[in-house]
Amino acid sequence: MPSRTLPPVEPYTPAPPPTEDLDYADLPVIDLSKTTTLEGRAKLAAVARDAMRNYGFLYAINHGYTPSETKRMFDIANVPFEHVSNEEKQTYAGNIKATGSYQGYKLRNYWHIDNGVHDQLEHYNINRDVTKKQHPQALRPLLPEIEAFAKHCHSNVLHPILRLLAIGLEMPEDALVNIHNYYAKGETYVRFMKYYPRSEEEEEKTNNVWLKGHTDFGSITVLWSQAVAALQILLPDGKWRWVKHVENALVINVADALEFLSGGFYKATIHRVVQPPPSQRGYTRLGLFYFAMPDDDVVLAPLEKVSPVIQREGVQLDGRFGDGEAPTMEVWRRGRTSAYGKSELKKDESGADVEVINGVVVKHYN
């Protein structure tokens, strides 16, 4: 971590925990401190493999940041929303549809949710190379801490998770690590995100859905657990269940790129964001993320040649590539980023909203 003499940041006060008895998903937990030994990795690999096969989500604890360090990062995450003027936000807004990149701000009302209602969430995205773009004045003194956070997420969270998942595929431990290089060309990034409460009219028109059910498009998403209950995942039994807040834990999920590379062995689980329960309504919901992707030039085709598991299990992608070839990570991320919330969707036989991006079928669920 950086020096103890840190720039002052206004503390962020999270919402109190929900008082309702919610139907929570029973997700497995892995202890990242045990990934430093061969024996520890061997034991945890089976847990991670089964979790990402059955749920696509798990919790990770003992990730190397103390509660106070995590609190500091949430304080920093609040800065681009509360300490940057609307005029300056416009200056640093990303041209998302044109560039296929989220770098900078995604401002409110950009995505269409349903029935003419647009989103009420804002996020600020910083490439792991924090020098790649300019940033608002209030964030500039904090860039060394943000860079240290990105490196920590990459080396001490992402890479250990990838090693466990590679072991689960009976591949060399570093097979997935080697295509997730910190300094390679790519768009892996830190995201600060804030949801704002909506009107009752908007809640009614969207059936209380703040962000439609979707899969992430990278390989692994790291979410730093926060207090407001709103995240739900669609489990194999067809039911939506809440993800419970675990203090100073991480919520880890598989995304599209890893599903493609594993031939469908690991599942990119559908998840959504909904209106919080009554005890937490009226609070904003602050998120701290690390969205990881393979290097831009990686072709997202199943790694059959290096994985005996994929060879035995076969490729289980349910025709998602259609008749086309697998895209590179760069092509896939640009296509998904440009289209999300902006393209015309059609219903399939299951009632899901469907679009085709670079020959790959993408579904969104209400």
Image (cartoon, rainbow, N blue to C red):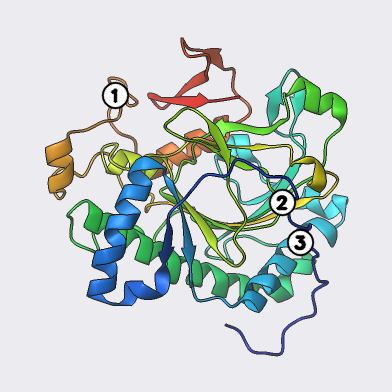
- Left or right: where 184 falls relative to 99: left
Vertical side of 313 occupied by 3: above or below: below
Q: What is the secondary structure assignment of the residue under circle 3?
A: helix
Comparing 143 with 95, the one in front is: 143
Instruction: Please tell me how crowded label 2 is: few (under 14), some (14-19), or many (20+) other residues with Cα within 10 Å.
Output: many
Residue at far top of view:
349
Which residue lies under the disc numbered 2? 228
Which residue lies under the disc numbered 3? 78
Residue 359 image point, x, y percent: 38, 24
- Left or right: where 109 falls relative to 171: right
Q: Residue, x 71% and y 90% (percent of image)?
A: 5
Mark closer to the observer (1, 2): 2
- Left or right: where 197 falls relative to 23: right
Residue 177 image point, x, y percent: 31, 61
The disc labelled 3 sits on which kind of residue? Asn
Vertical side of 161 occupied by 96: above or below: above
The disc labelled 2 sits on which kind of residue? Val
- Label 1 with label 2: CB-CB less than 8 Å: no
